[in-house]
């Protein structure tokens, strides 16, 4: 981060002026919380570097993506969330992928090493390829898994696929089966139930051979 980083967060108007001065296509984006801006995807690494070095947004909080709809075009947008550890402001940068069938965005691992796993997760679950990523592999699903589970065309219950261990699959004949979530909070329609009451509650399941299971939970 630059030594001249501001002690207070700039206003949305000032951030937009800064971005448009370097990237004329930058535009404000509707938001319900933090300042948000839309940029051409090719400009994103330079824009994030500008925000980091000149405005103190030194912490990459998250990288994610949106699948707007199977029929939408542009279908995919990538989202970067930045935070400042000095003035505690947040900013959101959004860029549409140019291709609806082979979406991609430039990697920012060169700016933040932590982007490595964020980009791998977004690739794994949404199918966004990050160009120049040093090791773009799946991080949750296994290598060779043919789907991207957070895309709009992927069913909530999943899709039956062969086991990742071919030898076990051949011997047992088992597959990875869909898991319907009947009555679960993820498939409940508005008005069917109180979603707060339906949401699962975490339990203390930390017992093991050295710490016995509590008598009551």
Image (cartoon, rainbow, N blue to C red):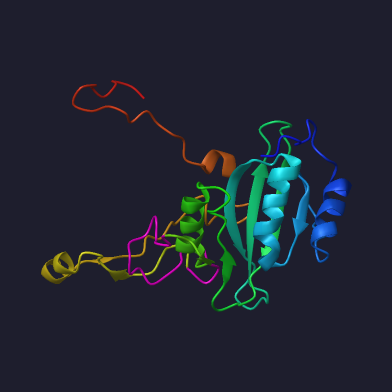
Side of 145 where 15 appears, left or right: right
Is 148 one of the magenta-colored residues? Answer: yes
Give the number of callouts: 0
x then y, percent, for residue 114: 50, 46
Residue farthest to the left, as pictured: 171
What range of the chain is rendered magenta? 135-154
Side of 88 where 21 appears, left or right: right
x then y, percent, for residue 96: 67, 68
User: Quarter holding the C terminus?
Assistant: top left
Look at 48% across and 63% down and name the residue there.
123
Seen from the viewer's position, the closer of residues 104 and 67 is 104
Q: Quadrant of residue 54?
A: top right
Look at 80% across and 55% down and name the residue there.
19
Residue farthest to the front, as pictured: 3
Whether 188 is drawn above or below 201: the answer is: below
Seen from the viewer's position, the closer of residues 166 and 119 is 119
């Amino acid at each position: 981060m630059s030594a001249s980083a501001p002690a207070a967060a700039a206003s949305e108007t000032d951030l937009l002026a800064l971005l448009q001065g370097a990237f004329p296509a930058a535009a404000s984006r509707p938001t319900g919380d933090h300042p948000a801006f839309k940029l051409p995807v090719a400009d994103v690494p330079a824009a994030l570097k500008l925000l980091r070095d000149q405005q103190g947004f030194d912490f990459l909080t998250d990288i994610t993506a949106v699948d707007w709809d199977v029929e939408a075009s542009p279908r995919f947008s990538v989202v970067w969330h930045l935070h400042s550890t000095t003035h505690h402001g947040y900013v959101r940068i959004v860029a549409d992928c140019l291709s609806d069938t082979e979406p991609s965005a430039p990697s920012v691992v060169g700016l933040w090493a932590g982007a490595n796993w964020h980009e791998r997760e977004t690739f794994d679950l949404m199918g966004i390829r990050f160009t120049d990523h040093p090791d773009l592999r799946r991080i949750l699903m296994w290598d060779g898994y043919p789907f991207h589970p957070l895309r709009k065309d992927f069913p909530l219950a999943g899709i039956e696929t062969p086991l990742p261990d071919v030898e076990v699959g051949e011997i047992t004949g088992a597959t990875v089966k869909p898991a319907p979530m009947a009555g679960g909070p993820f498939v409940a329609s508005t008005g069917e139930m109180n979603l707060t009451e339906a949401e699962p509650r975490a339990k203390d399941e930390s017992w093991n051979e050295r710490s016995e299971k509590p008598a009551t939970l």
